[in-house]
Amino acid sequence: MGTIPVDLAPATPDSETDAVSPIALMELGLAPPRSVPCLAIPAQIAQKIHALTEPEPHGRPNPRARDVLDVLLLLQRVEFDHTAVRATCERVFAECATHPWPIYAFDFPPAWRGILTQLAREVRYDTDDVSVIETRFNSYLAQLQGAAIVPNYEYRFIALNYFITNSTVDTTLTPPVTEGGVRYDHFQSYLKAGWRVHSIMDRAHGAGGEPELLVLLERPQPDS
């Protein structure tokens, strides 16, 4: 005897489903259906990204560490349309209205580190190094935002503040970003760890409404 955990949810008019072959039930004397409608893979991934990135849902720490590995395992084992994932993320985030999309980078809560190590071992994921798992997840977020992903490389977006000064000052030779503060120190730490700048894009209004630059970093995967 055994049990299989199943997530059940009511269907909505715009629910995207895939027809999945059922498990064999004939030995139990049950006639199985020809197929079972399951939530489509892009919708599953979009909902998991929304759930795991939600900051303190209902005022409690986010418990959805397992969703990270669900997403990464789907990336390894199933072929699907990533543009459909991005479009579904836009819809799911807009409908739920709990936190904004797009998400360019996501730092795992410290409480997830031990949980993810244990889960990775349980599901026999190819690494239980949480820093590698976090980098792989952020590489996929970068891919969803249009980054040109190269095999055996990893990617991550970071944001830098524009240098703002009085318009009467000659800024011809002034660096375009503020070379100080937590964000710049964070950027420098990545460069020292072997990351390099892949591309830079302007984001007119950051999370706090201030102008900022989004920098896409890349580096070869450690095992490549």
Image: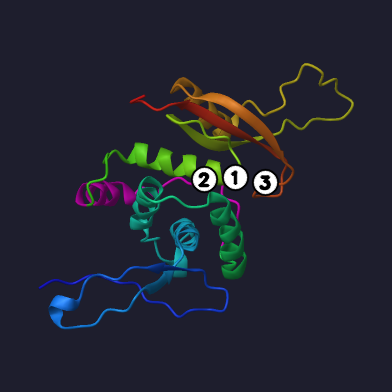
The amino acid beneath tag 3 is Gly
Q: What number is the disc on residue 206?
A: 3
User: Which quadrant would residue 153 be assigned to in this image?
Assistant: top left
Disc 2 element:
helix
User: Which quadrant would residue 215 be assigned to in this image?
Assistant: top right
Residue 1 placement, left or right of 46 = left
- Cα distance between the residues tagged 3 and 1: 16 Å
Give the mark nearer the N terminus: 3 vs 2.
2
Asked whether disc 3 touches disc 1, contact meaning CB atoms under 8 Å apart, the reply is: no
Position in image of residue 221 (x %, y %): 40, 28
Q: How is the image coloured?
A: rainbow
Asked if residue 69 lies in the magenta stretch, the reply is no
Q: Nearer the viewer, residue 112 or 148?
A: 148
| Magenta-highlighted residues | 99-122
Q: Nearer the viewer, residue 41 or 65?
A: 41
- Cα distance between the residues tagged 2 and 1: 6 Å
Give the mark nearer the N terminus: 3 vs 1.
1
Position in image of residue 143 (x %, y %): 54, 42
Q: Residues within 10 Å of mark 1 (few under 14, many from 20)?
A: some
The residue drawn where x is 49% and y is 63% is 43
- Cα distance between the residues tagged 3 and 2: 17 Å
* Quadrant (top left/top right/bottom left/bottom right) for the N terminus: bottom left
Q: What number is the disc on residue 62?
A: none
Asked if residue 104 lies in the magenta stretch, the reply is yes
Instruction: Quickly name the residue at label 1.
Output: 145
Residue 112 placement, left or right of 19 = left
Disc 1 element:
loop
Instruction: Quickly name the residue at label 2.
Output: 141
The residue drawn where x is 82% and y is 18% is 172
Q: Nearer the viewer, residue 191 or 5?
A: 5
